[in-house]
Amino acid sequence: MRHGKKFNHLGRTASHRKAMLSNMAASLVIHKRINTTVAKAKALKKYVEPLVTRAKLDSTHNRRMVFTYLQSKEAVTELFKEVSLKVGDRPGGYTRIIKTGSRLGDNAEMCMIELVDFNEIYGNEVTKTPKKGTRRRSKKTAQDSESTEKTVVQDKIEDKVNLDASNDEPTTEEKD
């Protein structure tokens, strides 16, 4: 039975687990995304999210407290300078776990854990909802579209005429 079992020990001693999570958290903060197993990612999520919350308020005490967990000056600086600026208005949920399949050797479930606001692929674009209007076109837009179509056709004809004229002119070699 698993009554009262709230923490995954990951098959490691306490000191090994603490060192592993500290290294993984520092890597996550510096690189913004890492690949690992699902169990480690879930443990890392619980480890790193309070640190990101603490980084929202930049004080000497908070920096020292975060340093006791990360043990890396570069990671602490990155967390307080870049990460805290992006997540300043977010109330929580700073990380995302995306499952990527099974590992080839031992069939362990693999995933990618990343900081939510640093994903370039999706999630950052602002979607604009179109303004609700009527289905018919107004006279003004119909006239504008017709005039632009005419100018495009006229430009194409002028370009073609210019090309034909430049091909018809004899060169200096042909004149002799």
Image (cartoon, rainbow, N blue to C red):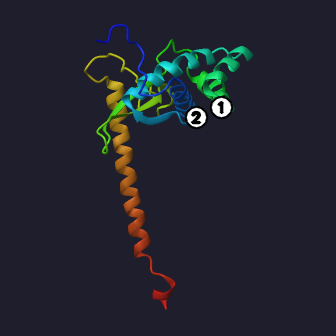
Along the viewing direction, whichever of 131 and 137 lies nearer the viewer: 131
Q: Is residue 172 shown left or right of residue 158? A: right
**Position in image of residue 43 (x %, y %):** 44, 23
Residue type at the position of mark 1: Ser
> Is 2 left or right of 40, judged from the image as shown?
left
Identify whether 48 is placed above or below 23: above
Check disc 2 and report the residue beneath it: 30
Question: Which residue in the structure is indicated by mark 1?
Answer: 72
Judged by depth in the image, the label closer to the viewer, 2 or 1, is 1
Counting labels gives 2
What residue appears at the point 34 percent right and 49 percent down from the top-left corner?
153
Residue 7: mark in rendering: none
- Which element carries disc 2, helix, strand or loop? helix
- Mark 2–mark 1 Cα distance, whole angstroms, equals 10 Å
Are the residues tagged 2 and 1 within 8 Å (C-beta)?
A: yes
Q: Position of residue 94 (x, y in %)?
A: 49, 21
- Residue 7 can be seen, yes or no: yes
